[in-house]
Image (cartoon, grey):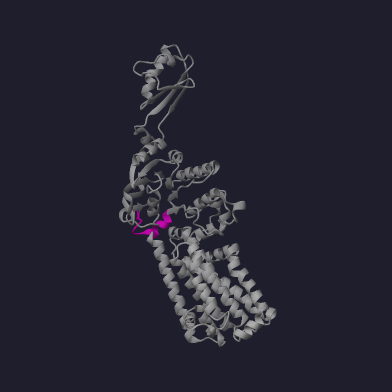
Amino acid sequence: MRAFFVQLGIQFRGDLRDKEILMVYYLVPLLFYAVMGSIMKTLEMENGVPLNLAITIFTLSMSAFLGMPQALVKARENGVLDAYKAAGIPAWSMPLATIVISTLHIMLVALVILFSAPYLFASALPESIAAYLLTVLLVALCSETLGALLSCFVKKQNTLTLVSQCLFLPTIMFSGIMFPADLLPKPMQWFGEILPATLGMRMISGGEIVAQVLIILCVMTTVFFLASAIIFKRISARR
Amino acid sequence: MIDSITVKNLSKSYGEKQVLRGVSFSVKHGEVFSLLGVNGAGKTTTIECLEGLRKWQEGEIVVEGISVRQHPEKLRKVFGVQLQSTALSENMTAKEAMRLFCVWHGVKYRGDLLTRFDMDGEYLNKPYAKLSTGRKRRLHLALALCHNPRVLVLDEPTAGLDVEGRNTLHREICRLRDEGVTILMATHDMAEAEALSDRIAILRDGVIAREGTPMELTAASNIQNRVYIKTRGGSLRENTPEALGMPETTMEGYSVWKCRDAAELLLLILPHIKACDDIVSDLRIERASVEDIFLSVAGGAK
């Protein structure tokens, strides 16, 4: 357990030295936040989605589908799994550590957006900050585990760049953060229903935890993580 | 000496392609053992099977009395593995890598190893991606030693290094051998294998084609030695002992003979020079090297 926490600390510090990670997790989302914030009044009136939630969902989707899987595939390509195996460390600890650290980055950005939005863009704070943060955490974990699962099926980083768009773009388009999902054709709405971001949006819309959605998100997170852990173990053992 | 590593009839295939066909060898305690072979001969596969990184179909590997197949977890304590040069996160510093490996192996932080491999000072907090190839190799070696392993496995330890980096690593390998660490090394570098190894095995088409000490390998070969002799009076240019015949060639004042047994040739030639009232001004014997043996064995594969 101690080894895992040491690994988390090292990985977090390493991430902060990585320009690509800083760009995907911090720079682009915060830039997007600044741009969207300047036109937020219009968007909020038309869409009814609070700015902080919309930007946070964008941030976590970007990191979960565009940033984190790339890091896992790159590490696998470079033989980092061999280092784990040679030291007798279970292969699943690699995606687990990456998911935890990635979620930590997301939560930091979410906090920055949450508490700065009222001052910078006159955006209202959620009724329950705890419920809001729990929702963001769950959606982040669910999206990150889905991203980890995606990384198991793609061997090359170049291919992943294309494949990951299949999750990122629908999340942005169908979850209702850009425009109301009601405006979309029915099949797209149905597809949107199974995305973690849509579930999170629904859960937070009432300002309280919806038990049913909470359970679905938890089950999805568990299934995605277990599947990716098993596949990572198999990849490590297959050679 | 007792065997530290025993590999028996190791066979491994990737799909249809059989890479190892019954490889067998043993490495004694405190010995440096080199595996030589052309690309695709099966060196890295053998090493990776030994490290427990790859599964194999047939055969048995025992390291320090531990079966690699049955108890891979016990192996971690006795084995030090030098990883490939990309197997660390690019943003990790040498200090962080050492800390992580020490925690993984359940030992205290080994800053002394970083100092020993000249990875302290400016290199300590430099991200891995910014280290030179030589520094990366040193770091990997330091990491492999963090838990004081009894067996060290090195795959191409000096590939891509400059002369200075190569010499430094060679010194460290010798030092580790002197400390009693068993070292198994796969290398392309013949001179390195000859200089460092107690014994060498040449892999060809997934089997051990030759095995022995560098001396045994060169002595048992059919490759002839070359003897270069230069005399002050040039007596060898004019006449030579009948039993010997004329030199194969002369170059820069040297008469050159090719022979299996240089001592036998000298026993014939030195009395002749003396009888001619001449003096040897230079004598050189160019023995068959491990590289010559390797090329003859690898050539046989073609």
Q: For the C terminus of chain B, which image quadrant? A: top left
The relative height of residue B180 versus residue A130 in the rendered view (above or below) is above
Q: Is residue B31 visible?
A: no
The relative height of residue A13 versus residue B45 in the rendered view (above or below) is below
The total of numbered circles placed on residues is 0
Provide residue B54's location: percent of width, then percent of height: 38, 57
Tell which residue pokes out farthest to the front in this image: A185
The relative height of residue A137 versus residue B262 in the rendered view (above or below) is below
Q: Quadrant of residue A55?
A: bottom right
The relative height of residue A71 versus residue A219 in the rendered view (above or below) is above
Q: For the N terminus of chain B, which image quadrant? A: top left
In the image, taking residue A55 as reference, residue B249 lies left or right, namely left
Tell which residue pokes out farthest to the right in this image: A119
Provide residue B25's location: percent of width, then percent of height: 34, 46
Q: Is residue B153 visible?
A: yes
A12 vs A187, nearest the viewer:
A187
Q: Is residue B67 magenta?
A: yes
Q: Is residue B130 magenta?
A: no
B72 vs B109, nearest the viewer:
B72
Residues in magenta, as a range: B65-78
Provide residue B9's location: percent of width, then percent of height: 30, 50
Provide residue B94's location: percent of width, then percent of height: 56, 55
